[in-house]
Amino acid sequence: MSKLDAKTSVAIGLGAMGLVWGIYGQALPPLADVRVGPSNDPDANSAEKAARWTSAGAVTVIALVSKDATVFIMGMSAMIAFSWLHRHANAVDPVTKTPIVPSSADLVHAGDGTPAGYALS
């Protein structure tokens, strides 16, 4: 149960959303640049993953310190939205303007059988 009133809870949630926006803004290039680059770029994938984990960690810490679920829901909603936007922009082929979904044959597997990235062929 939260000890915060509704206004404070929403204000902290908006702050968490702003923090997520800032993390994605610093960790990744603008969406337009990702979209005109090569589809399924492994560097863009890695940068998005780092931004996602950093955002998730920051939002979780803020939510635990504030002891408020609203903060967690608002912050994670922003993280999911930014993650989807960047993943979609990275999947779009700049020539055909359609998303390219890599097949399992395009995956490069590490020695333990886990997906490591995409083939550059």
Image (cartoon, rainbow, N blue to C red):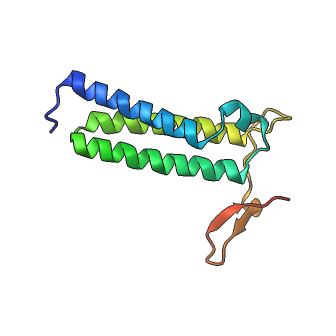
Asked whether 20 or 100 is in front, the reply is: 20
Q: What residue sits 53% from the left and 46% below the top? A: 51
Residue at x 69%, y 52% (from the top left corner): 43
Q: Position of residue 54 (x, y in %)?
A: 46, 49
Image check: 66 left or right of 95?
left
Tell me: 90 left or right of 95: left
Q: Quadrant of residue 59?
A: top left
Give whichever of 14, 96 is nearer the camera: 14
Q: How many marks?
A: 0
Quarter of the picture holding the N terminus:
top left
* Closer to the camera in the image, 41 or 61: 61
Residue 119's image quarter?
bottom right
Look at the image and tell me in which quarter the C terminus lies.
Answer: bottom right
Q: Taking 92 as reference, is 80 left or right? A: left
Residue 75 in the image: state x and y as whole percent. 39, 36
Q: Residue at x 60, y 35 (%)?
A: 85
Residue 66, given in percent of the width and then of the height, sits at 23, 39
Q: Nearer the viewer, residue 76 or 29?
A: 29
User: Which residue of the protein is positioned furthest toward the front in this rendering?
Assistant: 26
Which residue shows up at 62% across the image and 53% down it? 46
- Name the outermost residue toward the bottom: 111
Q: Position of residue 30 (x, y in %)?
A: 66, 33
